[in-house]
């Protein structure tokens, strides 16, 4: 296995304003590598702590995500705006042209997360793909939606690549992308540095992770604590005399995956980084017991088939 560089980034899903400032400040003090934030409303608090903090800029990893509603032609401006908010300057201020983000991710790289969310289909609630062996209207819409998503994804990613070439960010990538989408982008000649996907004990998206490892792409896991109440996790935690969250964190550290744990509790923020850095992997037997918990279920309880095309038959020795 190649030597993977793993990071622990501070997750910001639940907080804004002063609470976010306090948590992020502690995270930096405890030694987190950086922060991951969805665009909008969180840049300023992060920027304030960054300017107060004495750490060198290049020792803190700043990552933002471009949400799907940002239009193709607005992507560069919105990256500039995010950087500007972080540094407390307007996007026109020439000073912040020298400042950069470490990573920008395109979130949900298609306009529709599932083809069934296509508005017409949603209204009519029809679900017949073929009539008398010929594609039904549904199937045509599905194909059109896929085609449209693909075109839009390419146009958006092209803007991201431009931002990278202009030096506005050092790395670019996708969030919640399927293997098909990743391949499509790579085949078009674009660069992918980072993939951030949902990955937890119930959704072990090994095909994407292994593809990333093989192609030198950094794989990050979000929503990592889903399944914290699982019986098997509780059992392993009691064997190791630790909390279920610690077991999950050790599982990620054993698999050498970059993690983005979100927490507003100082004790948890500290515990998470200590466990991750401790270099104390779970035993092979424990790793195998967790491997078989995979059910292709996402955090909403939906079955994920495209996002997590599985390595269908895995060797029982694999973990
Ligand atoms: N790309 C995407 O679509 C996407 C989607 C979701 C999330 N994310 C990213 O993932 C990051 C984190 O997401 P998240 O906060 O939703 O999920 P998460 O990290 O999986 O879980 C956070 C929850 O776990 C608890 N927790 C954390 N550490 C703990 C510990 N040591 N012991 C006990 N409980 C602990 C927290 O409670 P306490 O506050 O009490 O510690 C909080 O309720 C965010 O940066 C977000 O941007 C990305």
Image (cartoon, grey):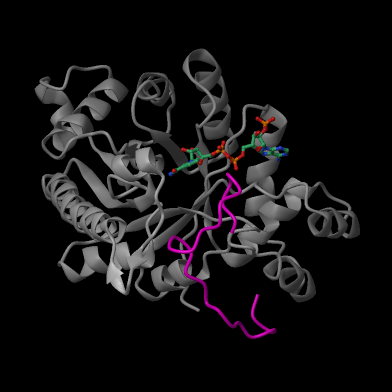
Q: In the picture shown, does residue 301 fall above or below 188?
A: above
| Residue 63 visible in the picture | no
Question: In front: 315, or 133?
Answer: 133
Q: Residue, x 36% and y 24% (percent of image)?
A: 43
Magenta stretch containing residue 285, yes or no? no
| Residue 36 drawn at (x, y percent) | 43, 38
Residue at image point 13% right, 50% down:
155
In the rendered image, residue 178, in percent from the top left (x then y), is placed at: 38, 61
Q: Nearer the viewer, residue 203 or 169?
A: 203
Can you name the residue that lies furthest to the top here?
Answer: 18
Q: Residue 316 colored magenta?
A: yes
Tell me where the magenta segment starts and ends, as one range.
297-319
> Residue 15: x and y, percent?
53, 23
- What percent of the width, then of the height, locates residue 105? 32, 46
- Residue drawn at point x = 64 percent, y = 86 percent: 315
Residue nearest the observer in this picture, 87 or 149: 149
Which corner quadrant of the figure contains ligand 1?
top right
Quadrant assignment for the C terminus: bottom right
Q: Nearer the viewer, residue 26 or 200?
A: 200
As drawn, 170 above or below 263:
below
Above-or-below relation of 158 to 129: above
């Amino acid at each position: 296995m190649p030597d993977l560089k793993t990071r622990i980034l501070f997750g910001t899903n639940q907080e804004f304003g002063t609470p976010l400032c306090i948590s992020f400040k502690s995270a930096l003090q405890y030694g987190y590598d950086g922060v991951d934030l969805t665009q909008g409303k969180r840049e300023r608090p992060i920027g304030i702590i960054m300017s107060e903090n004495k750490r060198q800029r290049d020792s803190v990893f700043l990552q933002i995500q471009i949400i799907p509603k940002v239009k193709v032609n607005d992507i560069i401006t919105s990256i500039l705006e995010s950087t500007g908010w972080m540094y407390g300057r307007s996007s026109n201020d020439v000073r912040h042209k020298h400042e950069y983000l470490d990573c920008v991710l395109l979130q949900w790289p298609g306009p529709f997360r599932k083809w069934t969310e296509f508005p017409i289909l949603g209204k009519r609630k029809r679900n017949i793909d073929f009539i008398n062996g010929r594609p039904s209207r549904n199937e045509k819409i599905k194909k059109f939606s896929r085609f449209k998503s693909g075109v839009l994804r390419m146009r958006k990613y092209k803007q991201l690549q431009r931002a990278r070439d202009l030096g506005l960010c050092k790395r670019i990538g996708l969030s919640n992308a399927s293997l098909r989408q990743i391949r499509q982008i790579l085949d078009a000649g674009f660069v992918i540095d980072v993939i951030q996907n949902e990955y937890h004990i119930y959704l072990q998206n090994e095909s994407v992770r292994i593809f990333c490892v093989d192609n030198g792409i950094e794989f990050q896991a979000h929503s990592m604590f889903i399944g914290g109440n699982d019986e098997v996790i509780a059992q392993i935690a009691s064997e190791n005399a630790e909390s279920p969250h610690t077991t999950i964190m050790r599982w990620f550290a054993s698999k050498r995956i970059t993690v983005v744990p979100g927490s507003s509790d100082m004790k948890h923020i500290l515990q998470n980084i200590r466990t991750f850095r401790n270099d104390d992997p779970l035993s092979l037997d424990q790793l195998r017991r967790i491997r078989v918990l995979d059910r292709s279920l996402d955090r909403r309880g939906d079955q994920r088939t495209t996002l997590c095309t599985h390595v269908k038959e895995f060797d029982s020795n694999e973990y």
